[in-house]
Structures are given as structure tokens and as C-alpha cells.
Image: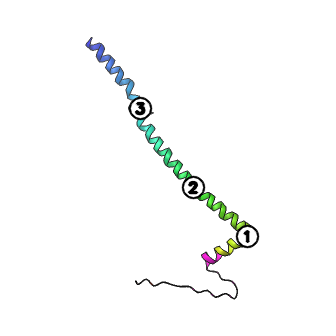
Amino acid sequence: MKSLAFILVLLLVLLQYPLWLGKASWIKVLQVEQELAAARENNLQLQNRNSMLEAEVDDLKQGFEAIEERARSDLGMVKQNEILFQIVKSAQP
């Protein structure tokens, strides 16, 4: 009788092994779910960035105002007969 109980307990442990420590265990399922959530968050951020870039490209294709604004801010360009005043703040408090 004791040997039958031992065999049944051993069989139960062998059946539980894949559930807890095997290839498709609960622990690995939770890890994959966490990785999936992180990937979805990253994809959402990238989609937001792409939509902002698409809007900027459309602005640049549509009119000259966006191009002029970009040239003024990034390249420091000025129009003809225009004077540029640049205010430099000192590093001392």
C-alpha cells in the first residue's frame, strides 16, 4: 500500500513538473506577457512619433511657412532687409 501511495505521489509530481518548470510553464507565460506589454508600449510610442513626423512632412509639402519656420529656427536664416537680434544670456547668476 505504501509503495502504491509513493508511486501515485511520484506520478503527481512528474505531471506537475511541466506546469511549473517546463517549456510552457506559468513562470515563462508571465515573462512573455510582460515582454508583450513592453513591446506594445514601445510600439505605441513609435506610432505617435511616426504620426508627428508624417504631419511635419505634410506641412513641409503643403506650404512655405513650415519651411521658412524651420530655416529660421534651425539654420538662423533671415529675410532680406531684416535685422537679427540674438540675446545671449550670461552663465553667471
Q: Which of the two discs, 1 and 2, labels the residue nearer the N terminus?
A: 2
The residue where tag 2 is placed is 46
Total labels: the figure holds 3
Residue projecting furthest to the right: 62
* Residue at (66% x, 62% y) in the render: 55
- Looking at the picture, the colour scheme in use is rainbow
* Residue at (72% x, 72% y) in the render: 64
Q: Secondary structure at mark 1?
A: loop
The three-letter amino acid code for the residue at tag 1 is: Gly
Quadrant in which the N terminus appears: top left
Q: Secondary structure at mark 2?
A: helix
Q: Residue 14 placed where, x, y %?
A: 36, 24
39 sits to left or right of 60: left
Q: Secondary structure at mark 3?
A: loop
- Callout in the foreground (3, 1): 1
59 over 34 or under it: above or below: below
Q: Report how far apart the C-alphas of labels 3 and 1 lie in the structure.
A: 60 Å
Residue 44 or 76: which is nearer the viewer? Answer: 44
Quarter of the image holding residue 29? Answer: top left
The residue where tag 3 is placed is 22
Q: Residue 33 placed where, x, y %?
A: 47, 41
Q: Residues within 10 Å of mark 2 (few under 14, many from 20)?
A: few
Q: Report how far apart the C-alphas of labels 3 and 2 lie in the structure.
A: 35 Å
Q: Residue 20 placed where, x, y %?
A: 39, 32
